[in-house]
Image (cartoon, helix red, strand yellow):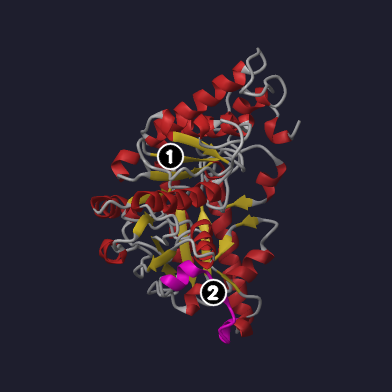
Amino acid sequence: MPSILRPFTSKKLPGIGERLPGKTWETCTYLDYNATTPIWPEVARAMTPFVNEHFGNPSSGHAFASPCREAIARAREHVGTMLGCDASEVTFTSCGSESDNWAIEAAVRAFRRRIGDLKAKPKVVATSIEHPAVIEYLKSMEAFGELTYELVGVDDEGVVRVDDVAKAIDANTCLVTVMHANNETGAMQPVKEIADVARARGVLVHTDAAQSCGKVAVKVDELGVDMVTIVGHKIGAPKGVGALYVRSGTDLGGTKPFYGGGQESGRRAGTENVIHIVGLGKACEIVERERDECPKHLKAMRDDLQKRLVEALGGADGSGVRINGPADDAKRLPNTLNIGIKGLLASISLIELGDVLAASAGAACHTADAAAAGGATVSDVLKAMNVPMEFAVGTLRLSVGRHTTKADIERGASLLIEAARRQNAGAR
């Protein structure tokens, strides 16, 4: 049995602010939670019986099948509770990319069916900071002549303006898709205000909430959206499972991600991935239970990390660093710190620290000369925000999680400060 699924022998499992067991956790500080999370101990324990004992096909009618069928129903209830929707509105998928692709295709097909023209090319409005699962799909479908799209820009804090989205909507618009929070900067988007504008004009609204679940409340009625994407491995569940919420009564245009059997109430064919679905359901149960406590822990860890880096590397006037994203904490995910450090080549430092620190950079650059010549590959998000190159190449994408400890913050900050100072000394 894989070690991650081995039942924890201790009755007390590591909770909020407690480090997970394992040698790598002792030698490498993890500050990359927005990329993926570890499987939470409670989730691993819930999944374990479905690795061996409960292996039946949920669609069968015998004793081996019923525990699996019941577990899927229970998981769907947990997802629904977290989102504040009915369980029947939740369809399990393989990942966030599938959910995002399906939401767009469904809106396109529904629009065509509504106007009675199956060859029409409806318009999708998105933002310039969307996940590739949205932007790359739009590019591909436009190339195939299936749709047109418009990407609305963001301000210097990485937040889209509602008025700009409203201006982009026209008579042919079938969908507005805006992520709930950006994975790089943590910038929260005005999804509720955008949804009010779009739905008043008869346009469907989808939001990718992969990054916001578990960090801020994600309630579908408060957001006012028609479709929501959630992703398991961002909230302590395994990779390879996600879900798409579809508001009851929403026309999906007759689309299905896969055709075959009648699983997922006929909406998505394929024998259900019971183990992973159980994991997602358990993770959602934990998120809902800890919806007040965990975000406070995340913010405390993030703020401590930010304070240490700014004080050590900002200089006397603080001009040596730049926080990329909203200045207002209420508009930024509580776990996310996107910080640009003047004089740092972040990608080089993170490669050097790879055995002792896990984090991400905002730009890829292999030498100082390449950076000076403009040869750095800067993320699309930083480009959209017009982040100056001197800070873009030194941008660190740092994110904390449920099991981040005070010691992790102290060690992570120390490693980054030492690396920045070492690099600056070598440049002189």
- Where on the picture, by quarter, is residue 220? top left
Determine whether, in the image, residue 393 is placed left or right of residue 170. Answer: right
- For label 2, the SS is loop
Q: Residues within 10 Å of mark 2 (few under 14, many from 20)?
A: many
Magenta-span inclusion, residue 374? yes
Vertical arrangement, residue 270 with respect to residue 349, above or below: above
Q: Earlier in the sequence, mark 2 or mark 1?
A: 1
Determine whether, in the image, residue 283 is placed left or right of residue 8. Answer: left
Q: Is residue 97 visible?
A: yes
Q: Report the magenta residues as a range.
A: 371-384
- Percent across and percent down for residue 36 are 58, 48
- Percent across and percent down for residue 5 are 68, 31
Q: On the image, numbered disc 1 is attached to which residue?
A: 245
- Where on the picture, by quarter, is residue 322? bottom left
- Where on the picture, by quarter, is residue 71? top right
Magenta-span inclusion, residue 173? no
Q: Residue furthest front?
A: 116
Looking at the rendered structure, the kind of residue marked 2 is Val
- For label 1, the SS is strand
The residue mark sitting in front, 2 or 1, is 1
Q: On the image, numbered disc 2 is attached to which residue?
A: 393
Quarter the N terminus occupies = top right
Per the rendering, the mark at residue 347 is none
